[in-house]
Image: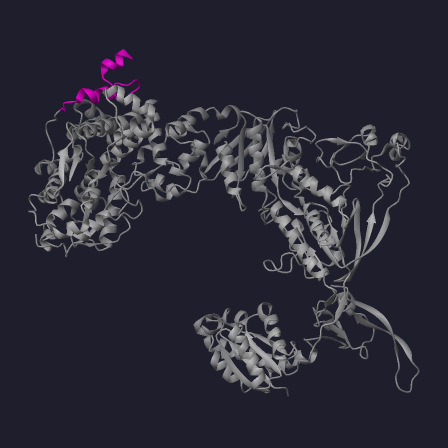
Amino acid sequence: MILLGGKNATEKDSVGAVVRASGHATLLHCYQCGKCTAGCPLAFGMDYNPNQIIRLLQLGRMKQVLGSRAIWICAGCWTCTTRCPCSIDIARVMDSLRVIARREGQTAQGRDVASFNDLFLQSVRRYGRVFELSVVLGLNVRRRRLFHDADLGRFMLARGKLRFTAEKIKGVKEVRRLFSRQGAPVRTRKERVKE
Amino acid sequence: MKIGYYPGCSLESSAKEYDRATRLVARHLGIQLYDLNDWNCCGATAAHSTDHFLAAALPARNLMIAEEMGLNVTVPCAACYQRLRLAHRELTENEATAREIAELLGRPYQGKVRIYSLLETIAGIGLDQLAAQVVRPLKELKVACYYGCLLVRPPGTGCDDPENPRLMDELLLAAKAEVLDWGYKNECCGASLVFSERRLALRLIRNILRNAVDAGATSIACACPLCQTNLDTRQGQVNKEFGTSFAIPIFYFPQLLGLAMGLYPQDLGLGKHFIDPQRAIKAVGG
Amino acid sequence: MPRIGVFVCWCGSNIGGVLDCPAIAQEAASFPGVVYSTEYKYVCSDPGQKLIVDAVKEHRLERVVVASCSPRLHEETFRQVLRRSGLNPYFFEMANLREHCSWVHPDTTVREQAQRKAVDLVRRAVAKAARLEPLFPGKIPVVRRCLVIGGGIAGIQTALDVADAGLEVLLVEREPTIGGNMVKLDKTFPTLDCSACISTPKMVAVAQHPNIRLYTYAQVEEVTGYIGNFKARIRQKARYVDHSKCNGCGTCWTRCPVTVPDDFNLGLGERGAIYIPFPQAVPNKPVIDLEHCRRSTRGKCGACAKLCPTGAIDYEQKDEFVDVEVGAIIVATGYGLFPWEKVYGEYGYGRFRDVITGLMFERMVNASGPTGGKIQRPSSGKEPKTVVFIQCVGSRDEARGKEYCSRFCCMYTAKHAHQILEKIPGSEVYVFYIDVRTFGKGYEEFYRRVRDEGAVYIRGRVSKVYQDGSKLIVRGADTLLGEQVEIAADMVVLATGAVPAAGAADVARMIGIPQDKDGFFQEAHPKLRPVETHTGGVYLAGTCQGPKDIPDTVSQASGAAAKVCGLLLRDELETNPLVSKVNEALCTGCLACQPVCPYRAIQPVTITERLPGQPPRERVVARVNEGLCQGCGACTVACRAGAIDLKGFTNKQLIAEVDALCL
C-alpha cells in the first residue's frame, strides 16, 4: 500500500536530489507510456519495470526505489533514453539511483554489481588502468565462487589474453587525485580514518 | 592522416587482437595512429554507476593529453568512445565540474579535441579509397554487423543513427562482404552485467546470436571489445543454458577489413577467438 | 411502358471487386422496359454523369436506374443529372449494390449468391422505375425571424451571429440571467482567460443588440408549425419586479432580510429572496423567489417594496404569455452535471462537506464567488494542503453512470490542479484518472505543464472516500504500479460528467427532436449534418447535442447560425415532394393516422362532398401538412382504408418491387 498526502509525502526531497543529479527537471513529464519498458532488454529480469521506477519517483517513493533490484539490473544501454518521447534521460536517472544507493549503503539488491564496480574502480585507482584479472578474481573471492568462469579463464590464458602483472601508468598520482575528492566512492583506509 | 589513438584497457589484454588488427589496417590505409601518452582508464560503467564526478574526470585526463599533443582522438572501444564523448560534453557544458577537474589535474581542458569512433575514422578516408585496397573480396561472407549500444546511444554522442546504424555495413560492403539487414544490430549484449548477473546477460547474448543466425548470418562483426568477448566467449555457456548449438565466429570489423586487404589472418589475431573462424576465413579464400 | 436505362457502377473495387458488373448490366438489359444497360467504373464521376446525360438523349430514356451505392450518398447527385438531361429528377431509382451487397458479402464462398442478389436488387429498382411518377416540390413562404432556446454561451453566440446577419432573433432563457454555465467558470483552459471577462461582454452585446429580443426567466411552452413557419408560445414567469420601472439600483437585494442557499454558487454562498444571480447578470435587475420571500411565507415584510425608489415591486404580478412566429429554431439548452450524490455512495453520497464538484471549485476559486477566490475546505474554511481530484465521476461508468466520455473534465481538472499549485504554496495535488484526453489545440501542452508544476497523476479509479477525523481518506490504486494507494486529503474534487440539462426531454417532445440513448439531442448526421436535426428548420448548438468544450460549442453555435441565415435569407422554400398525400375520396376520417405521425403533420379537416344525385354532405377527412411531413410513411401503414400514399413510395410502386423480388 502506498500512503500519500501530508506527512506521508516526506520523501519528496530525496527525489528532488535524483532529479537534480540527473541534470533534468523533466521527470515529472513522464506520462507512463511505457516505451522505456517496452524497449528495455533487461526488463524481464527486473522487479520494477523502468517506467515503474519513474512512477515511484513521481510518487516520492525513494526507499522503495533504492531497495529495488531493477536499478542494479540496468546495464546502461541507453535504449530508454534514446526513445523517450518526454526527453527523460532514464539511463542517467538509473545511474543517479545507483550512486545514491551506494552512498547510502543500500546495495543489498545489487551486491555483485556494486562489488564489481568497486573492484574495477579500485584497480583504476591503484594502476591508472583497469587490471582485468584482479577485478574478476576479486569478484570471485567476494562471492566465494573461486572457479566461476574458470573455463573462460583457461581459454583466455591459452590465447595470451590475460595479463598477470599490472603496470602502473606514470601519471597514477593524477588519477588518484581525481579519487581524492570529498565523498569519492573509493577511499584508502587512511582517507577513511581522516574523514 | 594523423590522429591520436586511445586503445583503452581491454585492447591491452582481452581484446589484444582488436588492437593488433586496428594498427595493421590503419597503417595499410595510411592512417597514422599516435598513442595518447600515458593514457588512463575511462572509468567505464563502474565509474558512471558510482560517481558522476569520476565519470567525467577520468576521461578528462585523456582529453587533456590529446589536447596537449594537438590531436583528435580515435577510439576503438565503444564504451571508451561514449565515456570520452560524454566527458567532453560535461566539460564544455558544466563549468563547475570543468573547473574542479582542472584544479585537481593542474591544467584546463579547452575543449578542442574531437572524438571519433574507429568506424568513423576508417570511413573518413573514403569508401572508394577503401574499396581500392581490397584484394580479397569477402564475397562468401554473410555478415551481420553488430553495433551494440554505446557507439550509437545516447543520441547526440553516438557516431551513427541510433536505430539503423550503417557505418560498419558500408565499410564491409566496400570490402564486398554480403551484409545482412537484421533486427538486433543495436540491441544490448548485457555488457559487464555478465560478471554479476550472468544468467540475465546470457539471455541477451542468446537473443542476438539467434537473430543473426535466423537472418542467415555466418559471422558477426563487432566494434567493441566487450560485445565481442560476450558474443564470442559465452557461446558455450549460452548453448549449455539454452540447449542451443551456436558456433558463429565473431569478428572485430578491422579483422575483416584486413582480410580483404590481403593481410595474414594470424597477424590480424584471428587465432585468438573462442569460436574458431577458420571456416569463414577459408570461405573468403584467406 | 416507359423507356428505362440501367447504369451499373463498379465503385472502383468496392463493388467491382466482388460482383461481376458487366454480367449484371447484361442481365438487366432483359428486364421489362429496359432499352439500354451499361456499366462504368465510377458512375458518380464527371464522365460517369456524362454517360447518363448522353444515353438519355441517344436512347430517349424516360426513367433512369443507377445500381451503385446508398441513396444517402448519391441520390441527390443523380437527380441533378436527370434535371440536366431534361427529365423530372424523380424519374430516378437507385439500387444499392455496395452497402446492401458487395460490402456485406465479400466472402468468396458466397460469390454466386451475392451475384444473384445484386441482379435481384436491380430487378427491383427497374420494376419501381417503371411506375415512377413526376413529382414537383411546392413553395412555402418564410418568416424571417429565429427563436433561440437557451441563453448560455451557445445561445448567445448563435443569437449574435444571426442578428448580425440582419435577422430578428428571440432569445429565451429560463434563468433570471443569461450566461449559462460558462459565466460560472473562473478561468478557461488552456489559455487561462478569465471566463467572465470573455463572456460578459457578449452578454451585454445580446442585451443591446437592436435585432435581439431577450426573454429571461421565461420558457417556451408550445411549438407548432413547420420549417419557415413556426408558432411558439413563450411563458414569461412572474418576477414580481416590474423591469420597465426597475433601474437596478440594488437597494432591494442588499436589504432583503431572508437568506437562502445560493443556487448560482451551488450552495457555497447565500442570497436574499429578492436577488440577482451575480453582479454582472444580464439583465441586471432582480427577481423575487416567492417560495422563500418572507412576505409570502409569513404574510408580512414587504421591505423591498418599501425601499424601492421606483415602485417596481409588484407582488401580484402574474405569468404572461407571448405568442410569436418564427421561421427557424435553434435549440441551445446546454448541459447539467451528473447527479453523483444519488449514485456514488463510495464517495459519500454528498455527505462529506469537503467532497465538492468541479463546478463548485470554479465558484470557490472565482474572485467574485462566495469565498472571494479563496480556496478553502467547506467544513472548516481552512486552506487545503492536499487535494485529490477524481476524474470520470459519472462518465465512462456503464454500471451506474454514463457510458460516454464527457470530454471537458480532463482539461478542467488539469486547470484546477494548476490553480491549487499556483495559489497554495506547498500544496500537493493528486489526480486519479483512467485516460487523460487532451483533444484540443494547446491542451496536451497544458496537461504537460501541470504535471511539471507537480500535479501527480495516478492512473486508476478511486474506490472509496471516507472521513477520518478532519481528513478524507482516498483509497485508490496505481494501476501502472499495480499497487493500492491511500491518500490523506483535505479536499476531494469530483470531475462530474455532463448530462443533458434538466427539462431537455420536454423540449425534445415539444419541438419533435429525437434524443439519443443518453438524452442528448440527435443531430441529422454525426459527421456531415452536425447542427441540423431531422425536423426541418430546427437546429442544434452546443452541449444539448453532446458534451463539448467552449471552443467547440462556439463553433457549433456559429455553424447553426450560418444554417439559419441560409434558410431565412431566402424568399420562399422548396418543400420536399416526397410527402404523404391523403386520397380524400377513400379517407373515412377515422384519424388513426394522426397519433402515429411523429411530426404532427396530420390534422382533421371538414370537406363538403358532392356525389352525383345526392345532396352535398360534410365529412371529416385527414389532411397532411406538406411543410411538416418528413415522408416517414408511418401514416400509410396505419391507414386501414389505404387512402394514404407516400409520394415516391406509393403502394403501387412498393408492391411492384416486392413482386419483382418474390414472384
Q: Estimate the x, y position of residue C611 in percent, counting from the top left.
A: 88, 84
Q: How many marks?
A: 0
Across and down, in percent, residue C219 comes to 79, 49
- Look at 67% across and 50% down and name the residue there: C544
**C606 on left or right of B233:** right
Residue at (43%, 34%) from the top-left corner? A26
Can residue B21 be spotted in the picture? yes
Q: Is residue B166 above or below residue C84?
A: above
Instruction: Locate the N terminus of chain C and report the quarter of the image it occupies.
Output: bottom right
Vertical side of C586 occupied by C312: above or below: above
* Residue A169, placed above or below residue C511: above
Q: Could one spot residue B252 in this view of the protein?
A: no
The magenta span reads A168-195
Outermost top residue: A194
Tell me, yes or no, whether the highlighted magenta stretch contains residue A172: yes
Above-or-below relation of C637 to C599: below
| Rendering coords of residue B237 (x, y %) | 19, 42
